[in-house]
Image (cartoon, rainbow, N blue to C red):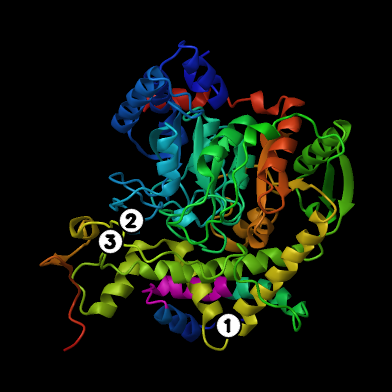
Amino acid sequence: MEPYTFTVQSAQAALQAGRLSSVDLTTSVLDRIYRVDNSVRAYLAVTPEVALEQAAEADKRRAEGDTSPLLGIPFALKDIVSTAGITTTCGSRMLAEYVPPYDATAYRRLRTAGAVLLGKTNMDEFAMGSSTENSAFFPTANPWDLSRVPGGSSGGSAAAVAADEALFAIGTDTGGSIRQPASLVGIVGLRPTYGRVSRYGLVAFGSSLDQIGPLTRTVTDAALVLGALAGYDALDSTSVDVPVPDYRRALSGDVRGLRVAVPREYFVDGMEPGVAAAVRAAIDGLASLGAEIGEVSLPHTEYALPTYYLIAPAEASANLARYDGVRFGLSAEQPIDVWDLFRRTRDEGFGSEVKRRIMLGTYALSAGYYDAYYRKAQQARTLIKRDFDRVFAEYDVVVAPTSPVAAFPLGARVDDPLQMYLADIFTLSVNLAGLCGMSVPCGFSDGLPVGLQIIGPAFGEAKLLQVGYAYEQATPWHTMKPSLTAAEVETAES
Amino acid sequence: MALDRAAVEHVAELAKLGLSEDELVMFAEQLSAILDYAAILQRLDTSAILPTASVGGLENVMRDDVVTPSLSQEDVLANAPHRHAGQFQVPAILD
């Protein structure tokens, strides 16, 4: 078995037994990247020197007796998480040359744990999108079908894990950007609770919604990576000081008596039949494992999409006001005056989707429209949150599809923003309500992966892992991989 | 809610966002469609509902006023497109 195909858990066992060094493992993954990434295009930047140096350091730490679970494990980082000395572009022309002067806490924590950085992954510009086609540099392909999208906005991170170009990856999720791409490429993606993982050094998009989380091949790996990421950080004023449990203890495989809610609003007309069938079968599977399934209603579900697409752009328009061509990033040439500098820098630096959201957000916050749009959306957010509060008073988790459709063709939705926004219809509510959610592979629809979404209450990550692990152990989906033969051939020819 | 060209130009100016002629036309159409969709929120009776601005549950996070190390001037200026005498340089703001 090639080392690049290992899970975090199996690689750790091999490293600990002395059958493999981190340098060998990292070299194996780098070779894999060189073989397939010309076709998959998951990475914006590969950092082999950094990776091999960190791998050698990990081998040294192990020789000295360190047995941290992520020690020597190579991973990919979404290019929105700051890395000192390594470009952090956010998939934008605006930050194409930007080199952060400091590390994000999430990256620092992974480095402390001994994980090895392979490079920075592609994404929709400033994390705005559901297909990774909004990257200013190039789109990423879905490893299961190179003519289709990998989802987004963490599409590069998701594709890297699915194509065996990283043992795990880090993404961010503002409206579904970890769970939806995980679903579309057939891997595990976990969005932690708001406040669970520090966002210090994460370039801001929607400040009341953003979270950092893992994309992995298995639920066990998600538990291991989350354990390294989670924890209070005084540098992030929204970080919550709640103890971090040992998430591995949640991996009992037992869900007998667990109360699982199925919201009827998440099975809608227009859903891809193969997706609905796979998710229904997964719910039956949980029932046969002993979980108690009950149908519930989340009556404000239909309002989540408009609520999100007013609140997230409003927050984005404020956060993106900092790109003024003065302190960092692109700066327009030969400005007539400072206003010309601002207008032209922002015109030249931002792509269409980012501009669209700045416009929408600015409008929703502007005099005369604030109450009708922004305040109204915040009130709807209260109602959406109450729906979940009611359900979690009686149930341990909610299960639903992650995405209404499997991976769609590249180019199919780029010209219709509303159609693209609908890709997130089942994931947004988790962000609006401050919950945690995870997508686990649950089958295929016409040969393309389908994800089961498990939603838990705030700080209920252990419940997600418990349910996800039990389901995973009872099913074969996580062991299936795309062949990528076409990708290797294409790369060899290019 | 249809946004006309003048409204789009006004919002772009609030955001200090230069837009091409094509973008002005495209955004007038697309933003109108998105706002039409968002109009379903008006169906909700929210007269007695408090708005939710944040879900983290924290308010007024305080810390002790202790000096800690910060970035060097060189690090702070390292990404500046234009710098002068250890400062960020901008076009003249006052005549």
Is residue A427 part of the magenta span, yes or no?
A: no
Q: Which residues are magenta?
A: B15-31
Instruction: Kindly identify which numbered label has been placed on residue A183.
Output: none
Which residue shows up at 37% across the image and 66% down it? Answer: B65
Q: Position of residue A452 (x, y in %)?
A: 72, 41
Mark 2 element type? helix
Report crowding for label 3: few under 14, some 14 to 19, many 20 or more residues within 10 A (C-alpha). many
Q: Pointer 2: what residue? A: A95
Q: Pointer 1: what residue? A: A370
Residue A147 seen in the current view: no
Q: Quick one: label 2 or label 1, which is nearer the N terminus?
A: 2
Q: Pointer 3: what residue? A: A328
Judge left or right: residue A483 versus residue A321: right
Position of A136 relative to A59 (above/below): below
Q: Name the quarter where the C terminus of chain A is drawn.
A: top left
- Letter of the chain that mark 1 sits on in the rendering: A
